[in-house]
């Protein structure tokens, strides 16, 4: 959902939004174009000419992105407070922190655990059925969970995500009701990555990078990053999947903030825009279109469906849960399980 190294998320394209097949076609076209340019560039007699052509393509491609990045506002800036540190929100700023015993008890349910040498953070593997409930219990924090909107409680499967990320939770977050903004700090047990040796066969149904990005490295990078994600809910626009004009948390702009600094979006968010748009699911809040857009939200690329498989009561949602199990084909999940020895949340 919410990761810096991501093809995911993002605001609106043309109504009613590009289909997955259209986005795959765009991805193939981009790949083909890059191969054509590479082939031209390999011709010695054409090097001088193609060098200029490639430079021109790069400039024409980058210019709109730079313009968009400069103009991209921070929707969470309205939460900035006066005084030192008032512009920052990380895990330490949460009103309620997880109890010290929680992470250690959940780690006991993990298999094949390890510690990342650089950060000291801990990781492990969990089974297809175990992982959703480990994430659910690891992010259902008493005193916090009750204040988060019910639509985002539970555990979501990132169906169709081209990056080897599988599950995400939004329920351990700080909710600002007046501003309708949800802040999600970087925290253990909130995310999972694909732990299988080979990509699932179901990944062939969409454009993916399972063979190019190592899930374990991606997981370890997530743990090291101190990214806060802000979901700013707004009235649903005409060109989104939610009901146009609805103002009951059906549409949200998603931005990430490096080191939790709320005054400006991260570099990734500046160039790639993300949204959450509620779709017609089997129950309210169970299906969202996670739109990813480039070039001032005009080109969709890498979007997927955020699909709730565990509801707010910890119960499975069908048929989504069974479809998730079928997709996994028995492969385990990689989960970030803690900060390691010497930290207040071990």
Image: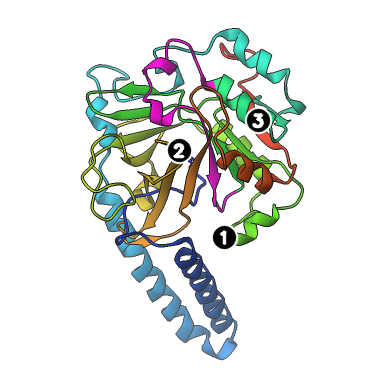
Name the residue rendered at 59%, 57% in the picture: 208
Q: Residues within 10 Å of mark 1 (few under 14, many from 20)?
A: some
Label 2 and label 1: CA atoms lie apart by 21 Å
Placement of the C terminus among the 4 image quadrants = top right
Which residue position holds label 3?
Answer: 131
Q: Looking at the image, is mark 2 or mark 1 nearer the viewer?
A: 2
- Nearer the N terminus, badge 3 or badge 1? 3
Q: Is residue 285 above or below residue 341?
A: below
Residue 117 in sight from this viewpoint: no
* 2 and 1 marks in contact (CB < 8 Å): no
Q: Looking at the image, is mark 2 or mark 3 nearer the viewer?
A: 2
Label 2 and label 3: CA atoms lie apart by 18 Å
Q: Residues within 10 Å of mark 2 (few under 14, many from 20)?
A: many
Which residue position holds label 1?
Answer: 206
Tell me which corner region of the image, top left, top right, bottom left or bottom right, holds residue 228. top left
Which label number is shown at residue 286? 2
Name the residue rendered at 59%, 87% in the picture: 44
Residue 90 in sight from this viewpoint: yes
Q: Is residue 63 above or below residue 92?
A: below
Q: Nearer the viewer, residue 171 or 48?
A: 171
SS of the residue under disc 3: helix
Name the residue rendered at 72%, 38% in the picture: 332
Q: Nearer the viewer, residue 309 or 276?
A: 309
Label 3 and label 1: CA atoms lie apart by 24 Å
Q: Is residue 183 left or right of residue 76?
A: right
- Nearer the N terminus, badge 2 or badge 3? 3
SS of the residue under disc 2: loop
Q: Residue 70 at what x, y percent from top left?
A: 27, 50
Q: Is residue 3 above or below residue 190?
A: below
Is residue 154 shown in magenta? yes
| Residue range corresponding to the magenta coloring | 139-163
Q: Residue 108 at what x, y percent from top left?
A: 73, 17
């Amino acid at each position: 959902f919410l990761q810096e190294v991501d093809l995911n998320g993002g605001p609106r394209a043309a109504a009613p939004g590009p289909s997955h097949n259209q986005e795959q076609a765009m991805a193939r076209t981009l790949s083909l174009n890059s191969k054509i340019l590479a082939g031209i560039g390999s011709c010695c007699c054409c090097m001088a000419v193609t060098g200029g052509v490639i430079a021109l393509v790069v400039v024409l491609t980058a210019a709109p992105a730079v313009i968009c990045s400069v103009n991209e506002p921070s929707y969470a800036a309205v939460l900035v407070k006066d005084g030192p540190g008032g512009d920052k929100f990380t895990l330490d700023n949460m009103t309620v922190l997880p109890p010290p015993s929680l992470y250690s008890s959940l780690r006991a349910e993990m298999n094949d655990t390890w510690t990342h040498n650089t950060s000291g953070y801990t990781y492990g593997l969990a089974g297809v059925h175990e992982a959703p409930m480990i994430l659910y219990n690891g992010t259902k924090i008493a005193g916090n969970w009750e204040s988060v909107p019910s639509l985002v409680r539970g555990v979501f499967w990132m169906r169709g995500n081209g990056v080897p990320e599988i599950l995400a939770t939004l329920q351990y977050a700080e909710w600002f009701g007046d501003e309708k903004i949800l802040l999600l700090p970087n925290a253990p047990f909130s995310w999972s990555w694909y732990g299988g040796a080979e990509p699932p066969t179901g990944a062939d149904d969409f454009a993916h990078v399972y063979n190019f990005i190592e899930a374990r490295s991606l997981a370890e990078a997530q743990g090291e990053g101190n990214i806060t994600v802000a979901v700013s809910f707004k009235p649903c626009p005409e060109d989104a999947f939610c009901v146009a004009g609805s103002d009951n948390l059906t549409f949200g702009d998603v931005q990430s903030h490096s080191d939790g600094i709320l005054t400006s979006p991260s570099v990734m968010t500046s160039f790639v825009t993300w949204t959450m748009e509620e779709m017609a699911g089997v129950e309210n809040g169970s299906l969202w279109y996670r739109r990813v857009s480039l070039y001032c939200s005009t080109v969709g690329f890498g979007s997927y469906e955020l699909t709730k498989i565990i509801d707010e009561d910890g119960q499975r949602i069908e048929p989504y849960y069974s479809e998730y199990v079928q997709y996994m084909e028995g492969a385990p999940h990689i989960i970030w399980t803690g900060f390691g020895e010497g930290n207040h949340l071990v």
